[in-house]
Amino acid sequence: MELNSLKDAFDRVAKKQKLSFSKTQEVMDLIFQEIEKAIEMMQSTTFDYKSVLAELKKKLHEIAPLSQLEGTQKELNIALSKYPKALEKILNPDISKAYRNIEFDSNTVNQIIASHFYRLGLFDVGDCFINETGEAEAAVAMRSLFQEMYQMLEAMKSRNLEPALKWAAVNSDKLKENGSDLQLKLHHLQFVKILQKGSRDEALKYARTNFAPFAANHMAEIQKLMGCLLYSDRLQDSPYAHLLSPTNWDVVAEELTRQFCNLLGQSYESPLNVTIAAGVQGLPPLLKFMTVMAGKKQEWQSMKQLPVPVELDKEFQFHPIFVCPVSKEQSTDDNPPMLMSCGHVLCKQSINKMSKNSSKSFKCPYCPSDIDATQCRQLNF
Amino acid sequence: MEIDPLPNGSGSVGTTIPEAAATTTAATAALKTTPSSKLSQLTESLKLEHQLLRVPFEHYKKTIRANHRAVEKEVSSVISSVADVADCNEPSKEDAVLNLTSLVSRLQGLKRKLEEGSRTENLQAQRCRARLDHLESVDAENLSEWNNVRLKRILVDYMLRMSYYDTAMKLAESSNIQDLVDIDVFQEAKKVIDALRNQEVGPALAWCVDNKSRLKKSKSKFEFQLRLQEFIELVRAENHMRAILYARRHLAPWGATHLKELQRVMATLAFRSNTGCAKYKVLFEPKQWDFLVDQFKQEFCRLYGMTLEPLLNIYLQAGLSALKTPYCYEDDCTKEDPLSQDSFRKLALPLPYSKQHHSKLVCYITKELMDTENPPQVLPNGYVYSTKALKEMAEKNNGTITCPRTGLVCNYSELVKAYIS
Ligand SMILES: [Zn+2]
Ligand SMILES: [Zn+2]
């Protein structure tokens, strides 16, 4: 993007402002000096004070301070009017053009926001918000849910694994059910931590008591970890140096967050975060459409489906979407995707059309096969 | 015990902790692999940031103009004072010197004011720059952090517009984004809004005077609306003489452009505040003051180049529509989808569904995209899963497949590939 041209335009404003400031100062100093000089002359007896006054008046008239300022002021004004024009040209000056005039229920929005703060561990901000809005108390439930998680994460930041280990032990069965080896990962960190302190015996003892339950499924890793014992006093210079990387802690913290949310029945990402990120991706094509279809503003307010395709990144894909390659329509319960005998898939309406309501066979649009509509099977993605 | 001399990460089973490189988020990883589309996406998203750059600039401009006006006024008044002294018929020498000396100290005061004003201007210029720098700073490495900041900015904007000032400040401070939000701009609005909530129009009228030329340019009738309300209050207090005087002075000038409204309000003189006539009764309702507050917010936002709606609402609407599918309101909508939550569903209800041009099939089991690399396969009952998921299942269960949604058991060999174009 042309950010540089914006910066240049702004630099011009700032430069002209400085210029105007110093010019103003200069002019004021001039007035200042003239008056001081006049006072001095009036106080000496050599001059007639009245003529000094008249002279001062004349001088100030000649200096014409205000018209002196005009020039720099004019330049400043030009720069001041150019910058916003550049902003409007390079950026989108009105991102509300695709906004539908519907009132969001503010109580619902506030509840979402309060929950978001608690999810992020911004407990003070969340409390302050609930206080200030006097509503959204429903979100307080989120507070206590997530407090436990942030206590574990905070402890991990100061390299204390106790709360996390305790939680993982209590939920060990559920974690296993979800296919997570978080518990072993935590033990792993603890083991390295003990080893780092240089106490090999203690590390060995720790490994014996804690790794055993994982031996069946994770033998290879456990063996590698035990290899560390050889280097207990110089781990940072050993082939195991990477085990000391602080990123390992971040990775486990992320896994802990994921598993914690999962067991709570919560999403991993804050839903507000996801929605706004989707909005940032979805808005540009909508705005473009609005610019082109300025006349359809009224229709837009009542459309049941967006008028333009909005392609979101994969992480926003929560449902399988089938678009019939013939009709370009999205499948619905009434118009489901159908598998033809050749393996190609069309939606039911397209097949009905091509087979004249199953009265005749037709050619698959994508291969030479003859298709019998009655042999097509409905698909469930 | 077997000792592996080179234990470099081995992600084969996945317990060993991956190294630093593996921790980059999916978003940034994608950014590296498909730079062109991702970059254009990023550029598009930066184009949405007009308000971020515009508001501090309008603030800056306003300060510059105000400071300049103050200087002009003072300087011309000093010059005319000198002329007064000089033109005075019989000034004593002492008086003249005294007068000039006081002008000198006045000029000194002006100079101090000028310097102070310039400091404010510089601070505001710095803020404008900080925002430009912030837009420039985003890249593949810090994208997710930058996005987090964006959401916080959007939330502070919401707080300020809804008059949740404490939360706005707390959030800005705790995230250290004071330079990226417009708390000080809204301080100006707060004074006016608080007064209007107390049914005082004074600060609002003063604000109108301050921004006279720009309000005129946008054909604003906010001042007229304030005047009408003041008139109504006089009628309510049965202060009829004053009401008429007030109308002559403050309402009459708007007659040329807003005659109908003017006449309607004047008619209240005949009906009084306890009128049963709906058309006039409404003018006396307290919600007229709320209306003025809303009106002020609109004028205020327009003047500073802000969107009239909170940014949060704009992005929420776009995001909800982009995410909304007909399946979102069904029970099996995954919890990772915001639209699986009642609050989000409620907001999305009046919004349109998303539209897509191409099929995007996500495997029910692995949640991964099914494409030519990982094609969809059909069970005898018509349920479709990814090859990857089914293969894994078959390997674990001697070639037997169990449909996770219907319980149907079949053999891997009974599956048929589906071709999705
Ligand atoms: Zn075919
Ligand atoms: Zn959904």
Image: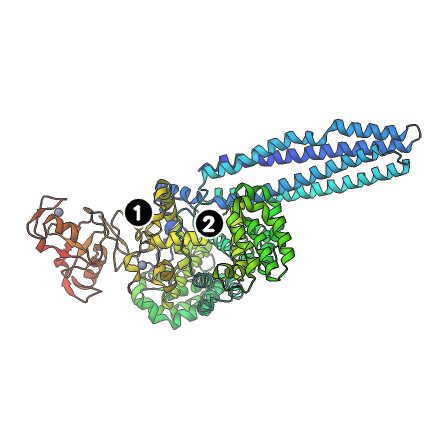
**Residue A309 circle label:** 1
SS category of the residue bearing label 1: loop
Distance (Cα) linking label 1 and label 2: 26 Å
Q: Are marks 1 and 2 in contact (CB under 8 Å)?
A: no
A155 vs B158: above or below = below
Please identify the quarter of the rendering in which residue B272 is found: bottom right
In-image side of A175 versus B270 (left or right): left
Residue identifier under label 2: B146
In-image side of B41 versus A132 (left or right): left
Badge 1 density bin: few <14, some 14–19, many ≥20, Cα 10 Å: some
From the viewer's perspective, is the residue at label 1 or at label 2 nearer? 1
Task: Name the amino acid, label 2.
Answer: Trp
Rendered location of residue B226, percent (x, y):
57, 53
Nearest the camera: A171 or A366? A366
Subunit of label 1: A
Nearest the camera: B310 or A103? A103
Rendered location of residue A349, percent (x, y):
16, 52
Report the residue at 56% width, 63% height from top: B273
Nearest the camera: A57 or B180? A57
Task: Name the amino acid, label 1.
Answer: Pro
The outermost residue toward the bottom is: A170
Q: Are marks 1 and 2 on the same chain?
A: no
Report the residue at 12% width, 44% height from top: A367
The outermost residue toward the front is: B270
In-image side of A276 versus B101 (left or right): left
B409 vs B362: above or below = below
SS category of the residue bearing label 2: helix
Rendered location of residue B71, percent (x, y):
70, 39
Q: Is mark 2 within 8 Å of ligand 2?
A: no
Subunit of label 2: B
The outermost residue toward the left is: A360
Residue B67 visible in image: yes
